[in-house]
Image (tube, helix red, strand yellow):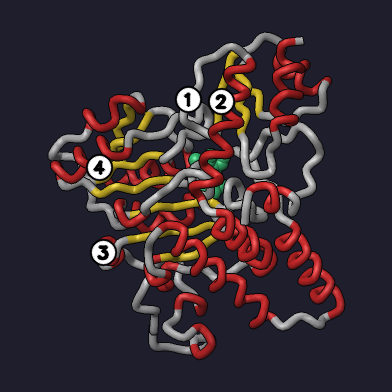
Amino acid sequence: MDIASARSLFRPDPGYLNTATYGLPPEPAWDALQTARAEWRTGQGDWRRWSEATERSRESFAALMGVPPADVSIGAQVSQLLAPIAAALPDGARVVAPEDEFTSNLFPWLVQATRGVKVTTVPARELADAITPDTDLVAFSLVQSATGEVADVDAVLSAAAAGGALTVVDGTQACGWLPIDAGRFDALACGAYKWMLAPRGSAFLVTKASLRSRLTAGQAGWFAGDDPHTSYYGPPLRLASDARALDISPAWFSWIGTAPAVELISQVGVAAIHAHNVSLANRFLAGLGRPTGNSAIVSVDLPDAEERLAAAGIRAAVRGGRVRASFHLYTTEADVDLAVAALLA
Ligand SMILES: Cc1ncc(COP(=O)(O)O)c(C=O)c1O
């Protein structure tokens, strides 16, 4: 499907430049969600059918990430999915991360301080250089949440490989627009409610089997069973042998909205979305007289930005005087030009 056809499946009011906060649903996701809500209201819903959306989501996400579905676990949000990895670090392990890392990929490591786990943070650009033979794990975002900076993955991975450190990435601000080969990392976590266009409440974790063999599925319930539908009652423990052992039972409505959204991203293709998004981000930057870049998220310092954007009805994030604007497949040149005009007015 081309970008123009995909765009016709969305209903944004003009001036939505805030996908880095939350993405908007395509019509098939919205419709599936409304149908399920109506079924819930009247008691006509079949929860097993609702659950199928989880497996559709897992399969589509796996294909997008270039990994088998057996390497994908499903959960509710990023820090929940990273917690078992943090719990498996040996006492006294050393973790390195960027100093401005979003906390869902920092707190899971920091809370292990009681066991002597030490987290060192450095400026993002110095991350590869900060990895030493003593480093056990490197945690970083593929795209930084506040600035949109795209990580130098090759440099970090080669430093990690040289020192034997595990690599754990947060793809929440990248999956859905940045081409990614998740098999390059020991683990990749992604919250789906931003660039994957899902409702809040669904997230994915991709893990290598070599890492999984070291993890305890501390949150396992019936859904992590080898066959969830024969895992309702009684011992023994009978966990899935693949990444499903790390699943938590699905929040039905989130996943019902997630499956069609991830499928749409697949139909359009990440390469086309990447080209579209970065070109709009660069139109925005050029319009403001700034150097262009390589990200779908940009951050610019502009006086009175909050008031100017609000007056023009533009939705973007404004923090500490900086505007964070983000551009996705439903964004148009008209949205960009509206924002530029408002900011330069
Ligand atoms: C990089 C990144 N990771 C994760 C999240 C959300 O984290 P969680 O899924 O733990 O709520 C955000 C939200 O802004 C984010 O920007």
Which three-letter amino acid code belongs to the residue tagged 1?
A: Gly
Whole-percent x, y for residue 10 in the image: 75, 50
Whole-percent x, y for residue 295 in the image: 50, 32
Q: Are marks 2 and 1 in contact (CB under 8 Å)?
A: yes
The residue where tag 2 is placed is 282
The residue where tag 3 is placed is 214
Q: CA distance from mark 2 to mark 4?
A: 28 Å
Q: Residues within 10 Å of mark 3 (few under 14, many from 20)?
A: few
Give the number of the disc on residue 196.
Answer: none
Q: CA distance from mark 1 to mark 4?
A: 22 Å
Label 1 vs 3, first from the N-terminus: 3
Give the number of the disc on residue 157.
Answer: 4
Q: Is residue 41 left or right of residue 97?
A: right
Q: Is residue 319 visible?
A: no
Which three-letter amino acid code belongs to the residue tagged 3?
A: Arg
Q: Is residue 190 visible?
A: yes
Which three-letter amino acid code belongs to the residue tagged 4?
A: Leu
Q: Are marks 2 and 4 in contact (CB under 8 Å)?
A: no
Mark 3 or 4, which is nearer the eye? 4
Q: Is residue 157 left or right of residue 123?
A: left
Which element type, helix, strand or loop, lies under badge 3? loop
Whole-percent x, y for residue 136 in the image: 22, 45
Label 1 vs 4, first from the N-terminus: 4
Mark 2 or 4, which is nearer the eye? 2
Q: Is mark 4 within 8 Å of ligand 1?
A: no
Residue 339 sits in quarter: top right
Q: Quadrant of the C terminus?
A: top right
Which element type, helix, strand or loop, lies under badge 2? helix
User: From the viewer's perspective, is residue 320 above or below residue 232?
Assistant: above
Q: Residue at x 33, y 30 (%)?
A: 121
